[in-house]
Image (cartoon, grey):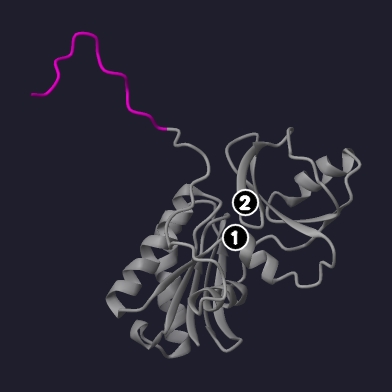
Amino acid sequence: MRVLAIDSAVGRCTVAYVDDGAVTGEHQDAARGQPGILAAMTERVLRRAGLAADDLELIAVTVGPGSFTGIRSALALAHGLGMAAARPVVGITVGEALREALPFLGHRTLWTAVPSRPGRVFIEIGASIVSVPADALPAAPGPIAVAGTAAADVASRLAARSADVMLTDAQFPGGLQIAQVAVARHRGERRPLPAEPLYVDAPEAKLPPPRAGALSAS
């Protein structure tokens, strides 16, 4: 299946064209500036593969957890391409892609750890995603493996509490794994997940309280 995979959820932009396991793609470290990078990367990847957007069969995009700006930038591009080419857009989580890259964990449960707000981390365990203080991680009920860009910190904190924890080297979602999960979801082999931003934290921006004496609109 001809799939375009897009990710900018966790500090690195990745765009890849995947066709039955063959990958054409690129990534670029970019803490900021995803909106300006992703479109150009996508154009280069499609040109290198000799394709136009309407040659694709599926567009896959990570929906979180991760950077608010990065997630929205990738989704905007994915939905724009999907609308222009009349192709389906499928969302996947960062943890789903990393789990696909780690098939031999045995009896260990995978925790995906991604930075959240200062002093906090997103923890994805199966279908559950929470944002918790880094110094108040949930207890590990059994042997676990940790992946993601905050994995080293989380693993060390858990090890200090005598948890049975293994640190993996999987940090960023890969284009091949994003595509593999998306194809399975498109075929109905995985639980549905909207291609929409996956917000775990409540928004930091809030409307100001009404001014004293302000009149209601009639």
Q: Is residue 156 above or below residue 100?
A: above
Marks 1 and 2, how far apart at CA: 12 Å
Taking the image as drawn, is residue 33 in sight? no
Q: Is residue 104 left or right of residue 53?
A: right
Residue 205, position as x, y percentages in the image: 40, 32
Taking the image as drawn, is residue 198 in sight? yes
Q: Secondary structure at mark 2?
A: strand
Q: Residue at x 57, y 89 (%)?
A: 20
Q: Is residue 73 left or right of residue 170?
A: left
Give 125 or 151, whichever is nearer the viewer: 125
Q: Residue at x 44, y 63 (%)?
A: 37
Q: To which quarter of the image does residue 22 belong? A: bottom right
Q: Secondary structure at mark 1?
A: helix
Q: Is residue 54 above or below residue 144?
A: below
The magenta stretch spans residue 53: no
Task: Report the disc number at residue 128.
Answer: 2
For this orientation, the residue located farthest to the left is 218
| Quarter containing the C terminus | top left
Closer mark to the observer between disc 1 and disc 2: 2
Q: To which quarter of the image does residue 163 belong? A: top right
Q: Residue at x 14, y 19 (%)?
A: 216
The total number of labels drawn is 2
Query: Where are the magenta residues, as a range?
Result: 205-218
Residue 21, position as x, y percentages in the image: 61, 86
* Label 1 Cα neighbours within 10 Å, binned few <14 / some 14-19 / many ≥20: many
Q: Is residue 4 left or right of residue 94?
A: left
Residue 80, position as x, y percentages in the image: 32, 68
Q: Residue at x 37, y 65 (%)?
A: 77
> Mark 1 or 2 closer to N-term?
1
Q: Which residue is mark 1?
A: 94
| Amino acid at the residue labelled 1 | Val
